[in-house]
Amino acid sequence: MQRKQGLEGATKRPSRTDFQAPLSHAMTHKIAFQGEPGAYSHQACHETRPEMEAMPCRTFEDVIDAVQTGEAEQCMLPVENSTYGRVADIHRLLPASGLHIVDEAFVRVHINLLAIPGASLGQIKRAKSHLVLLPQCARFLKENGIEGKVSPDNARAAREVSEEGDPETAALASELAGQIYGLDVLARHIEDHGKNTTRFLVMARQPDLSRRGDHGMMTTFVFRVRNIPAALYKAMGGFATNGVNMTKLESYMVDGSFSATQFYADIQGHPDDRSVQLALEELSFFTSQVEILGTYPADKGRP
């Protein structure tokens, strides 16, 4: 079943070629993320892998490709947020990536109102940010008479505010983005929900099956059930009877087909645990495919 730091604040728009290095110089100490410098994925890299150089990429596919080709040693991918749910496309990309989950990180998402130096809150008429972030600050924006403007990326919004120099335009982004693009924080932690958190997965080319961390181990896998009555119910029975806690179970279509469904699951435990072995063995009786995506330590911030 097993399958095969930087905070450089250049204000120009980054591209893959801006951060490319010869393969011989790119094999270690880089972690790729999707977005521009200052994105929340960059914050996750900065908080959980401060010893590594964060490498911006345009798309999730580019992030995965950077690790596959050796440009980066690891990558940081967001999989779900406590406010808006699962991140689109990630569950589809993970099994096909050929990469392995080696760690997880729960990162608190604080949204801040950023503006050019000298601007005041009373001057702000509009705020740019990603479509997902704007509703999370709806109360604050309404109370202050600020119109939300959609930007492809919250860090890009911060960069644009810095470049435009308009005291009436602000960005909704991380404090890290403010530091990178030389913006002032006019209001901190303005999100409507006080526990807004994103879960990230750290992925690498090689799996790490060692037992590590102080909060137990997690195992993530995908599977497809056989076309027999009550297959999913029977497949899940082994986890219940063996006392294995399943913390996540999600389904999604494969290749856009309504008849092909794949399930994504997280469980507490290591594949070498006897209880997990028995549960996976029972799972195999009712599935046509099982693929372990990674075994990794549970994050201390896991809810």
Image: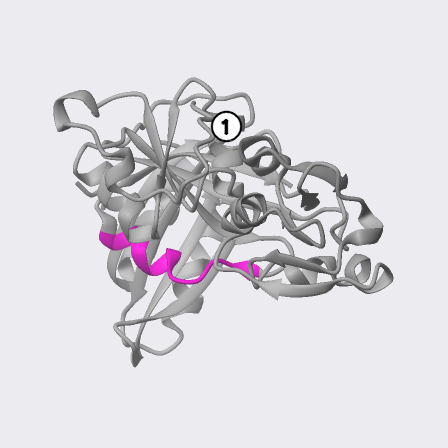
Q: Nearer the viewer, residue 281 or 245?
A: 245
Q: Is residue 46 left or right of residue 124?
A: left
Q: Is residue 249 above or below residue 44?
A: below
Residue 128, position in %: x, y? 61, 57
Q: For this rendering, which residue is in front, 77 or 207? A: 77
- Quadrant the C terminus occupies: top right
Badge 1: how crowded within 10 Å, few (<14), some, or many (20+)?
Answer: many
Q: Determine which quarter of the picture holds residue 118.
A: top right
Residue at image position (23%, 40%) is 17
For the rendered model, the colour scheme is one colour
The residue drawn where x is 27% and y is 70% is 226
Q: Position of residue 203 (x, y in %)?
A: 34, 37
Instruction: Give the side of residue 148 with respect to residue 264, left or right.
Output: right
Q: Determine whether the residue tagged by mark 1 lies in a helix, strand or loop.
A: helix
Q: Residue at x 43, y 53 (%)?
A: 265
Q: Is residue 247 above or below residue 301?
A: below
Q: Considering only vertical position in the picture, is 11 above or below 97?
A: above
Badge 1 amino acid: His
> Which portion, as a residue range, is magenta?
85-96
Residue at 76% of width from left, 54% of height from top? 124
Question: Is residue 4 or residue 27 the one in the foreground?
Answer: 27
For residue 245, say whether it is visible: no
Residue 59 at x, y percent in the picture: 34, 52
Residue 104 is one of the magenta-drawn residues? no
Q: Which residue does the numbered mark 1 point to in the structure image?
A: 46
150 up-or-down from 259: above or below: above
- Viewed as shown, does residue 244 lie left or right of 281? right
**Residue 296 visible within the image:** yes
Q: Is residue 73 left or right of residue 301?
A: left
Extreme residue toward the top, this view: 51
Picture mark count? 1
